[in-house]
Image (cartoon, coloured by chain):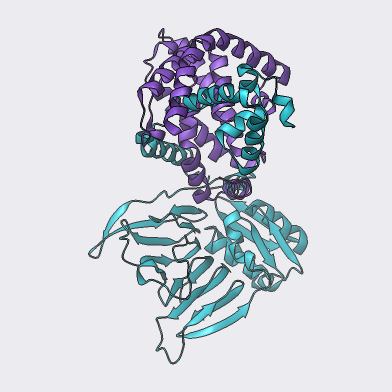
Chain colours: A cyan, B purple
Amino acid sequence: MRVQDYSHYALTDFLEDDFFIRWVIAPDTQANIFWEAFLMHYPEKKDVVSQASSIIGTYRRLETFTNESRKDAVWDKIRAEIQQHHVPVQKPARVIPLYMRAAAAIVLLAVFGGVFWLLKDHRNLVTTAHNEITKVILPDHSVVMLNGNSTLRYESDWAADEPREVWIDGEAFFKVKHINRDTLHIDPAHRFIVHSNNLDIEVLGTSFNVQQHEEKTNVTLITGKVKVQFTGAPSEHAPDVILLPGDFVEYGSQKLLARKKLSNPQRATSWMKQELLFTNPALKDIVKTLQEDYGYTVEVKEPALLDLRIEGEISVSSVEELLSTVSVTLGIRIEEDHKHITMSRR
Amino acid sequence: MELEHERDIWGDFKKGDWHAYTLLYDTYYKRLNNYGYKFTRDVALIEDAIQDLFVKLWTNRETLGEPSSVKNYLYKALRHALFRKIKTQRKFTLAPTENYDYTFELSWHDHLVVDEDERELQRIIKDVTGKLPARQQEIVYMRFYEGLSYEEIAEIMSININSVYKLWYKTVDNLKDALRHLLCVLLVYCVSRTGTEG
């Protein structure tokens, strides 16, 4: 645009011009130079330019309704409605159909999120049934996905000047909200600690998976950084371990059982997608998952079948799909009736 | 909000990041209210529409696209939500939404000292724009408040660009008569301004 293009502009022309309007709304150096040059060349336009900018300016000051006082109240309503939409889906006992895949994509909220009096503390207790995955939003908006047969405890109010603490029994995935900007100098009030029966995980802003099974606990770190302290053993036997993304540790019987780097750490979180994922599994591994994570009773007619192995990877989205895959690959007969599975030779 | 930053936040939100979603609300709540106010003075209705809009946004986040401007996208969505609400409300109540009390708030600029001339100017502009049909009021807002281009307005209002041109010319035409009256005031206003500045 050249300055002379505006030489014949009347008031309404200015009010229709994009470049002019934008200059009034948000002047920048370039536009300032242009309009100064324009007024220098055409000083007779000074009045009309100032009128047009007054109209726009006054209009802008006038038409302001922000409803700021209601901002929090409206937000609370939005949050409440979202939570209502996502009442957890109760799964039918017998068949596990395709809709499991759909259910896994929806955010599930705490069902058993009742408040209990435990010991002397006023705590939230979230417990999941077999084959039920629950998402818990902690008071600081950190997110916990709780796998089946697991329990999560935490205080209902988190004081700003105290560490955030949760207790886990079972398996869970944590996505912890960052408070610390500097992971080397943690403000004690900004700590986030996960306690399991034999170890503590101190989080430095991160996401990771914890699985605690009977006496063993394992931790897989997905992103960020955590410090693991083994509380079940004297510290000289099991010093603290710092985990970096992809690191896996397993602890049990008062000692560190495994510490390795996983090539595919995401696999540790596959349960959240309710995906059944196995690599070179023996039938006994599959049976174990069916019993422990999905609450089936499994009867194997001949114990020798348990050692049959499937080469390669199985990745399916439902138990039904898993059973038909196993049946076809191993050539065995599998029958299912009300959460009871029978496996036999064909 | 900067465009690139805005795109990151939108991406995180789509992945289910609650924090990003909260940020969208914090960033656009005031502006959406302000825009909604161009259609109705029924504040509760605007609140409901904003609530609907944000609930839908969250529940459908995975299927949403990548808008070139998040703000324009939200404007369009709010417009939709509001019209739907106004329609159903008309079905059930007899109270037309136009009859609401026109009260303007100056909350964004309350630091500003409003002098006599400015107040007079405001009164006239309020009067002039207030008499325009609703769609023309809306377009004035998008032009003068948001500085949107004709293309962007066409997208938000879901009409073709020629209709936007026509609507805008009609609006300016309607403003013209009033503007003539306004000019007298403006002349005094601007002269007194220049006088005090110089």
Q: Is residue B131 left or right of residue B109?
A: right
Q: Is residue B93 left or right of residue A15?
A: left
Residue B30 in sight from this viewpoint:
yes
Total marks in image: 0
| Farthest-out residue, bottom | A236
Placement of A60 over or under B68, stated as above or below: above
Is the N terminus of chain A in the top left, top right, bottom left or bottom right quadrant? top right
Placement of A93 over or under A333, stated as above or below: above
Residue drawn at (41%, 23%), measured in percent from left and top?
B118
Placement of A225 over or under B72, stated as above or below: below
Residue B69 in sight from this viewpoint:
no
Residue drawn at (53%, 20%), measured in percent from left and top?
B84
Q: Which quarter of the figure has residue A260?
A: bottom right
Q: Nearer the viewer, residue A1 or A218?
A: A1
Q: Position of residue B94 (x, y in %)?
A: 41, 7
Q: Which quarter of the figure has residue A150?
A: bottom left
Residue drawn at (55%, 53%), measured in percent from left and top?
A339
Q: Nearer the viewer, residue A322 or A274?
A: A274
Q: Position of residue B16 (x, y in %)?
A: 56, 48
Placement of A51 over or under A69, stated as above or below: above
Residue drawn at (68%, 13%), measured in percent from left and top?
B166
Q: Position of residue B62 (x, y in %)?
A: 62, 43
Is the C terminus of chain A in the top left, top right, bottom left or bottom right quadrant? bottom right
Q: Position of residue A25 (x, y in %)?
A: 55, 33
Q: Nearer the viewer, residue A335 or A87?
A: A87
